[in-house]
Amino acid sequence: MLHSARKGNDTLVSLANAGVQRNGRWLVRGVEFSVSKGEIVTLIGPNGSGKSTSAKMAIGVVKPTEGEVSRIAGLRVGYVPQKLSVDWTMPLSVRRLMTLTGPLPAREIDAALNATGIAHLANAEVQHLSGGEFQRALLARAIARKPDLLVLDEPVQGVDFAGEIALYDLIKNIRNSNNCGILLISHDLHVVMAETDTVICLNGHVCCRGTPQAVSQSPEYMRLFGGAAAKALAVYSHHHDHTHLPDGRVQHADGSVTDHCHPEDGHHHMHDHGHHHDNHDECGCGHEHEHGGHTPSSERQGDRHV
């Protein structure tokens, strides 16, 4: 069900107990979060956990089977997809990429390219860009129409460590300049953008939520990666009171086992809990990721196809 967000506050979009069912199976359920102007919300979780589905519910691409989604009237959305469906055998310049979703005045294209630091690449062929340059081009396309809400699906994929830090710094600057809300999707379960206001861990439902811890609090990390990384990245510690079993069921802290973790089963947890797990498998996410491992640019181009 769709409602208009209430006037008089800065909330751009909110989800209340929202879920999506396909062919009798819940893709995600019991999702609750909101994004306001100037706020950064990061969705994390393993593949298939419902991150992209939740983001698509937020912007209206997917309708919820249950629950409510509220958006301000006339919400303008800028979207950076995880994959871009384009025939890369055809010549495509960065400037042409900017207008694939509709015409834009030249001055707005130039302003967006300047804002993302790639004005000098306006006439470059997209297939020749590095991973970081390509992500900046997608960001430029997303902000050119001056969105209220910017949705970034894996914005640092295919980018090396230095490029990841630079992109997060750019995203922060975009937020500060435009006061737009940002909904960021990340596959990294433990290291997130330091400027994130709220981290939400999904695995078919909301497993936990909280705020990231500044990396600068770790002297070892500072020595290894330096001050720039400490300003751009932060560690998120999971707080789960349940474990996802191999058969798909959920075991709760009291020992009970349910088919799902959703409102009807009485174990719908939306906030931090007393059980504190730092290990991926212990927290039930079932996904391992070594931070800093990125796809080389020579392999990445195939990822741009759906």
Image (spheres, helix red, strand yellow):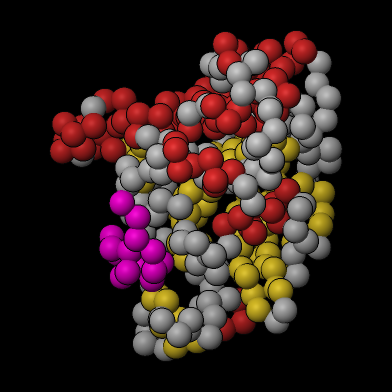
Q: For residue 143, which quarter of the picture?
A: top right
As drawn, is 31 to the left or to the right of 216? Answer: right
**How many marks overall?**
0
As drawn, is 269 to the left or to the right of 58? Answer: left
Q: Is residue 161 above or below residue 58?
A: above
Q: Is residue 61 above or below residue 267?
A: above
Type of secondary structure dominating the magenta stretch: loop
As drawn, is 123 to the left or to the right of 201? Answer: right
User: For the point 48% across and 33% down, which residue is it?
Assistant: 131
Which residue is at the front of the view, 48 or 180?
A: 48
User: For the point 54% across and 73% down, which residue is it?
Assistant: 268
Q: What percent of the width, then of the height, locates residue 279?
A: 28, 63
Q: For residue 33, which quarter of the picture?
A: bottom right
Which residue is at the front of the view, 7 or 40?
A: 40
Magenta-tinted stretch: 275-290
Can you say which quadrant of the picture contains the N terminus?
bottom right
Which residue is at the front of the view, 72 or 20?
A: 20
Q: What percent of the width, then of the height, locates residue 98?
A: 71, 26
Q: Is residue 49 visible?
A: yes
- Magenta stretch holds residue 293: no
User: For the point 65% across and 43% down, which residue is it?
Assistant: 84
Which residue is at the front of the view, 77 or 161?
A: 161
Q: What percent of the width, then of the height, locates residue 117?
A: 54, 16
Q: What percent of the width, then of the height, locates residue 197?
A: 48, 41
User: For the point 35% across and 55% down, which residue is it?
Assistant: 289
Q: For residue 274, which quarter of the picture?
A: bottom left
Q: Is residue 194 visible?
A: no
- Magenta stretch holds residue 283: yes
